[in-house]
């Protein structure tokens, strides 16, 4: 398995509170991604990073922010959690982009907003 | 924009019988296509990938997929199902413009009965 660690693995939080999820990699891959997985939607891209301090929005970025101050860490922050952000969040990494390149996924973080 | 459609949300088979999981894609360019598998409460694992080298792609655990451009399909097959194949399977297409992000289908849950 690729060296990707997500923390925490499970979290329950209250509506309106800030939440930060962490993705840590030991592969020194340039690209990192945050996805959310919801029934009937597959995985949808929230934000991605193409280098230290280089990030951009994905298709479902509203309500989320990210930071990448080191190659190995990519943080996802919910500034004020809402029930619609209850989901399973996956971090992924890839060494490069291009047709031969797949992404490697972490184990996921199950977030419940009550 | 590229998209992918998984035609069945659930597929049920008996152990030892063939597996067919259907995937159709749309793409303005030559696509890269992937199949990922997700076992319960686990991350996503790459099964196989198509990158234009050969239309019949072999993956792990006896799975294979055939790229058919005329039918815009990339169906996943296995000659004989095993109980351990029970999982959710995602067909994924890589956009070949801009950032080249991965676009996921909504998933097919494979159920294997004894």
Image: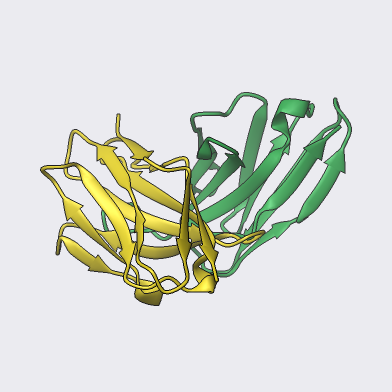
Chain colours: A green, B yellow
The correct choice, above or below, for B103 with respect to B113 in the image is: above
The correct choice, above or below, for B16 with respect to B51 in the image is: below
Query: Which is nearer the eye, B106 or A63?
Result: B106
Query: Which is nearer the eye, A79 or B110?
Result: B110
Q: Is residue B56 left or right of residue A37?
A: left
Q: Quadrant of the N terminus of chain B?
A: top left
Q: Quadrant of residue A14?
A: top right
At a point 28% along the width and 41% down the height, the residue shown is B24
Picture coordinates of residue B52, whole percent (x, y): 16, 57
Query: Which is nearer the eye, B55 or A46?
Result: B55
Query: Which is nearer the eye, A25 or B42?
Result: B42
Q: Is residue B54 left or right of residue B73?
A: left
Q: Quadrant of residue A82?
A: top right
Callout count: 0
Whether residue B83 is visible here, answered yes or no, is: yes
Picture coordinates of residue B5, whole percent (x, y): 35, 38
At a point 43% along the width and 63% down the height, the residue shown is B46
Whether residue A103 is visible here, answered yes or no, is: no
The correct choice, above or below, for A100 with respect to A55 in the image is: below
Picture coordinates of residue B59, whole percent (x, y): 33, 70
At a point 67% along the width and 59% down the height, the residue shown is B41
At a point 49% along the width and 33% down the height, the residue shown is A58
Picture coordinates of residue B93, whole percent (x, y): 33, 45
Q: Quadrant of the C terminus of chain B?
A: bottom right
């Amino acid at each position: 398995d690729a060296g990707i660690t997500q923390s925490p693995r499970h979290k329950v939080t209250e509506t309106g509170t800030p939440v930060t999820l962490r993705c840590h990699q030991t592969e020194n891959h340039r690209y990192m991604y945050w996805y959310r997985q919801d029934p009937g939607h597959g995985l949808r891209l929230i934000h991605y990073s193409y280098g230290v301090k280089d990030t951009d929005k994905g298709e479902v970025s509203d309500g989320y922010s990210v930071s990448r101050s080191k190659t190995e860490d990519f943080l996802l922050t919910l500034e004020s959690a809402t029930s619609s952000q209850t989901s399973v969040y996956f971090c992924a990494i890839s060494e490069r982009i291009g047709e031969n390149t797949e992404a490697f996924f972490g184990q996921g973080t199950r977030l419940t907003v009550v | 924009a590229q998209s992918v459609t998984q035609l069945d949300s659930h597929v049920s088979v008996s152990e030892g019988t063939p597996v067919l999981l259907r995937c159709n894609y749309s793409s303005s360019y030559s696509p890269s296509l992937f199949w990922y598998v997700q076992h319960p409460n686990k991350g996503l694992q790459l099964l196989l990938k198509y990158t234009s080298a050969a239309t019949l792609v072999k993956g792990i655990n006896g799975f294979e997929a055939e790229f058919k451009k005329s039918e815009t399909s990339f169906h996943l097959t296995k000659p004989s199902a095993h109980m351990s194949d029970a999982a959710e399977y995602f067909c994924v297409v890589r956009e070949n413009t801009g950032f080249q992000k991965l676009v996921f289908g909504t998933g097919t849950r494979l159920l294997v009965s004894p």
